[in-house]
Amino acid sequence: MKNYLILILVLLSVSIRAQTYEIGAFAGGANNIGDVGRTNFILPSDIAYGGLFKWNKSKRYAWRASVIYGKFTADDSKSSISSRRQRAYKMDNSVLEASAGLEFNFVDYNLHKLGPAFTPYLYTGITYFRYEYKYFDAGQVQDIDQKDGSFAIPMTVGMKIRLSQFLILGAEIGARLTFTDNLDGSNPEGSNFEQFKFGNIFSDDWYVFSGITLTYTFGRKPCSDCFE
């Protein structure tokens, strides 16, 4: 039994040394895509910022977790749709999300090899977020000081490059397909709010974070065969 325990500890030690971790920050902007305001896929209307952590399991993929806060303004007067401009609704909202999933590198990305390292990447997983529950009454936003929560599927594309032995700079655009239709106050839930619903109730809202990441790498370098 003692020998088995020693073997397990040795294997765990090798596994831990064979990984590289990253911790850092995200900064950029946020915008929504829904029944109020613009429908541009990438056009931030306010700020977004947060932190992220990566566990690079190989040269091709990494487990990733993040917490990001963002704000956006949905403004009909800036929409390219004439009916929305005539309606002239406007509202602000914010989201605070926690996300976890898999980041996939298009090319081999070996942080333990000297020289430049660059790759485009994709990220997806599962996201849970909190947002402000609002609705419109006679064209005016009604803020009842209440939070609601929902899940979303993140779909992120980006690129990253190593600046030095320890610093990695990235740029990414991440769309979140949510499972709510009330980020913009167009579809409040509950029997008391049926008269306040409008827009396409069969299409859920999206929100998008666009920005840059800067991460610091740490963890012991693995042997030449451990990071395949």
Image (cartoon, helix red, strand yellow):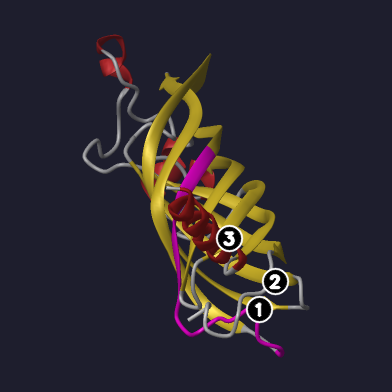
Instruction: Give 10 or 77, whichever is nearer the viewer.
Output: 10
Residue 195, x across and y down, in percent: 28, 17
Mark nearer the N terminus (3 vs 2):
3
Crowd around label 3: few <14 · some 14–19 · many ≥20 (10 Å)? few
- The mark nearer the N terminus, 3 or 1, is 3
Residue 47 falls left or right of residue 176: right
Q: Residue 144 carries which label?
A: none
The relative height of residue 111 versus residue 84 in the rendered view (above or below) is: below
- Relative image position of residue 29 (x, y in whole percent): 63, 53
Identity, as a three-letter code, of the amino acid under mark 1: Ile
Residue at the image point whose x is 64% and y is 78% from the top: 111
For mark 3, give the secondary structure: helix
Numbered badge on residue 13: 3
Residue behind mark 1: 161
Q: Callout 1: helix, strand or loop?
A: strand
- How far apart marks 3 and 1 lie (CA) works out to 29 Å
Q: Where is residue 8 in the image (x, y as percent from the top left)?
A: 47, 55
Q: Is any atom of residue 26 visible in this view? A: yes
In this picture, residue 137 sits left or right of residue 45: left
Please tell me the numbered disc located at residue 168.
2
